[in-house]
C-alpha cells in the first residue's frame, strides 16, 4: 500500500467518524484494516456499504431496532469481490429502515442529511450511501434498489448511480424486500467509478453493439414522467433536452408514449413487494447466526411509515392468487418496455429521476410539492417505479443545480441484459449534460 493509499483510506475513516450528515451507522477501526493484497483494479480506494448488505467486519442492522448489533459470518459476494480487488471498506451507511422508503428518515439511527442542505433528506433508501459520496467522504458506495433506492439519492445528492439488470451482479447476502425487484448497485462520484465497480463485481457482460445515431426515447410532455414536475426540476430537464438537441453528438431524441408503463406498474409494483417482503425477509432472518423473526422486526420497527407497510405486508402474506396475478401483470410491463424499445429502435429512455428535489427532513409521509400537500413516497417514486418494477438497468447522471440550490438528476433506463450498451449511451450523454458536484474534492 502506498502512502497516498494509506492517507486516502485513513482520511475517509476520519471523515466518516466525524460525519455531520449521519451518513454512516458504523465505521471500521483503521488500525485493524486488512492490508491491500497486490495491485487490484480498486487497490487502496476507500468505499462504503449500505447497512442492509452483509459484511463480516461490521454489523448489518438495516437501520431497524431488532437487528442492532447483528453480525454475519460471510461477506456479501459483491463485498468479497471488492475486497479482492483491493478496495478498502470504510463503514456501513444509513438507509431508510429496512430499505422500505425513500427519505432515509430517523429509525434505529438518526436521519441521514443531504450534503447540499442539512435540513433536507439525502433520499432513500440508500440515502447514507448517497450522502457519503455526495459529501466526498468516499468515491463510491454500494447500495440496493427495489423501487428507486439508488437513483433517488443520486439525484438528490448530485452524484452518479447504477442499478444493474437483476442477475448481472451477485444477489445473495442482503436483507431483502423483494427477490423479484431487489438489485444491488453502486453510487459514485463519476461514471468512470460506476464502470470500474461493475467490471469488478459483475457475473457477466454483454457486447455493446450500437447503431448510430443512438436513439433516446423522451416521454411526451403531458406524460406521467413529466407532469407535473417541480419548477427547479423542469428547469434542469428543459436545459438537458436543449443541450442534447444542440450538441453535435451521436444521439437522436425520439418522443414516445409511456403512459402504459405507469398503468401497469401501478397495478403490480407495490403489491409484489408487500407480498414478497414477508416471505423473503423471513427466510433471511431465520438464517442469521442469531435468529430473528419477522414478527419481532414488525413489533420493534422504529418509523411510522415502515411499521405501517410491514403491518400491511403481514396481513397480505397469504394473498397468493392476487400475487400471481400481479406477477402476470409485471410480465406485461416487461413486454411493454420491450415493445417501446423495439418500435422506436431505442437505445435508452431518458427522464427526470425524481419529480421533485430533496424534501425536508421529517417529510416521511407527506410533503409540499406542485403547490399542494402530496404523499411523499408515491410522489418521489413516480418516475422510478416503472423501470425498477420491470428490472430495467438504469444509470443516473447529475444534470445541474436548480434555482433552489438543490441538485437535479436525469436517469437513462436501458434494455434488460444490455447494461454495456447503456454504459456507452450514458457516457455520450454525460459529455453534454453531466455536472460534477461542487462539493466533491
Image (cartoon, rainbow, N blue to C red):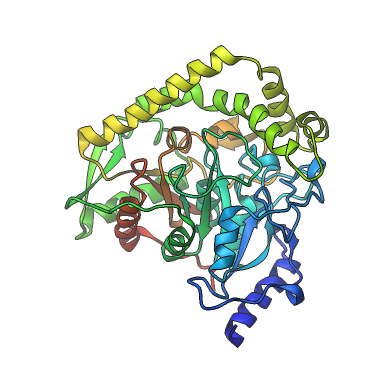
Q: Residue at x 55, y 14 (%)?
A: 322
| Residue 279, picture quadrant | top right
Residue 236's spot in the image, x, y percent? 40, 51
Front residue of 218/8: it is 8
Residue 293's spot in the image, x, y percent? 79, 32
Q: Is residue 422 above or below residue 308?
A: below
Q: Is residue 432 above or below residue 341?
A: below
Residue 378's spot in the image, x, y percent? 55, 31
| Residue 415, picture quadrant | top left
Residue 178's spot in the image, x, y percent? 58, 33
Front residue of 315/249: it is 315
| Residue 86, picture quadrant | bottom right
Q: Residue at x 68, y 34 (%)?
A: 283
The answer to whether residue 213 is left or right of residue 361 is: left
Q: Residue at x 74, y 64 (%)?
A: 27
The answer to whether residue 124 is left or right of residue 324 is: right
- Of the 4 image quadrants, the one containing the N terminus is bottom right
Amino acid at each position: 500500500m502506498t502512502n497516498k493509499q494509506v492517507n486516502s483510506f485513513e482520511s475517509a475513516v476520519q471523515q466518516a467518524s466525524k460525519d455531520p450528515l449521519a451518513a454512516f451507522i458504523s465505521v471500521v477501526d483503521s488500525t485493524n484494516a486488512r492490508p491491500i493484497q497486490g495491485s487490484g483494479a480498486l487497490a487502496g480506494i476507500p468505499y462504503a456499504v449500505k447497512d442492509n448488505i452483509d459484511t463480516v467486519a461490521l454489523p448489518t442492522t438495516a437501520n431497524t431496532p431488532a437487528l442492532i448489533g447483528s453480525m454475519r459470518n460471510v461477506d456479501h459476494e459483491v463485498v468479497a469481490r471488492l475486497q479482492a480487488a483491493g478496495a478498502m471498506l470504510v463503514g456501513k451507511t444509513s438507509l431508510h429502515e429496512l430499505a422500505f422508503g425513500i427519505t432515509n428518515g430517523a429509525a434505529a439511527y438518526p436521519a441521514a442529511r443531504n450534503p447540499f442542505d442539512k435540513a433536507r433528506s439525502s433520499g432513500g433508501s440508500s440515502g447514507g450511501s448517497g450522502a457519503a459520496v455526495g459529501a466526498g467522504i468516499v468515491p463510491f458506495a454500494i447500495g440496493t434498489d427495489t423501487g428507486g433506492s439508488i437513483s433517488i439519492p443520486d439525484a438528490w445528492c448530485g452524484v452518479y448511480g447504477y442499478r444493474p439488470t437483476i442477475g448481472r451482479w451477485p444477489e445473495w447476502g442482503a436483507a431483502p424486500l423483494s427477490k423479484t425487484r431487489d438489485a444491488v448497485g453502486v453510487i459514485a462520484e463519476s461514471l468512470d467509478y460506476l464502470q470500474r465497480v461493475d467490471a469488478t463485481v459483475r457475473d457477466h457482460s454483454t457486447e455493446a453493439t450500437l447503431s448510430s445515431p443512438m436513439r433516446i426515447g423522451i416521454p411526451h410532455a403531458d406524460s406521467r414522467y413529466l407532469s407535473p414536475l417541480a419548477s427547479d426540476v423542469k428547469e434542469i430537464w428543459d436545459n438537458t433536452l436543449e443541450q442534447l438537441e444542440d450538441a453535435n453528438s451521436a444521439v437522436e431524441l425520439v418522443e414516445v408514449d409511456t403512459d402504459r408503463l405507469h398503468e401497469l406498474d401501478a397495478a403490480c409494483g407495490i403489491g409484489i413487494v408487500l407480498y414478497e417482503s414477508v416471505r423473503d425477509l423471513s427466510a433471511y432472518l431465520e438464517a442469521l447466526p442469531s435468529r430473528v423473526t419477522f414478527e419481532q422486526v414488525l413489533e420493534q420497527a422504529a418509523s411510522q411509515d415502515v411499521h405501517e407497510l410491514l403491518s400491511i405486508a403481514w396481513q397480505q402474506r397469504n394473498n397468493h392468487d392476487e400475487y400471481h396475478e400481479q406477477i402476470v401483470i409485471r410480465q406485461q410491463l416487461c413486454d411493454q418496455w420491450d415493445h417501446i424499445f423495439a418500435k422506436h429502435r431505442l437505445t435508452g429512455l431518458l427522464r427526470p429521476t425524481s419529480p421533485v428535489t430533496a424534501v425536508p427532513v421529517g417529510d416521511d409521509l407527506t410533503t409540499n410539492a406542485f403547490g399542494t400537500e402530496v404523499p411523499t413516497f408515491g410522489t418521489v417514486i413516480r418516475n422510478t417505479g416503472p423501470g425498477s418494477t420491470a428490472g430495467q438497468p438504469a444509470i443516473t447522471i447529475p444534470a445541474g443545480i436548480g434555482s433552489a440550490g438543490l441538485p437535479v438528476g436525469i436517469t437513462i433506463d436501458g434494455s434488460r441484459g444490455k447494461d454495456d450498451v447503456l454504459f456507452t449511451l450514458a457516457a455520450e450523454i454525460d459529455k453534454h449534460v453531466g455536472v460534477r458536484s461542487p462539493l466533491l474534492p
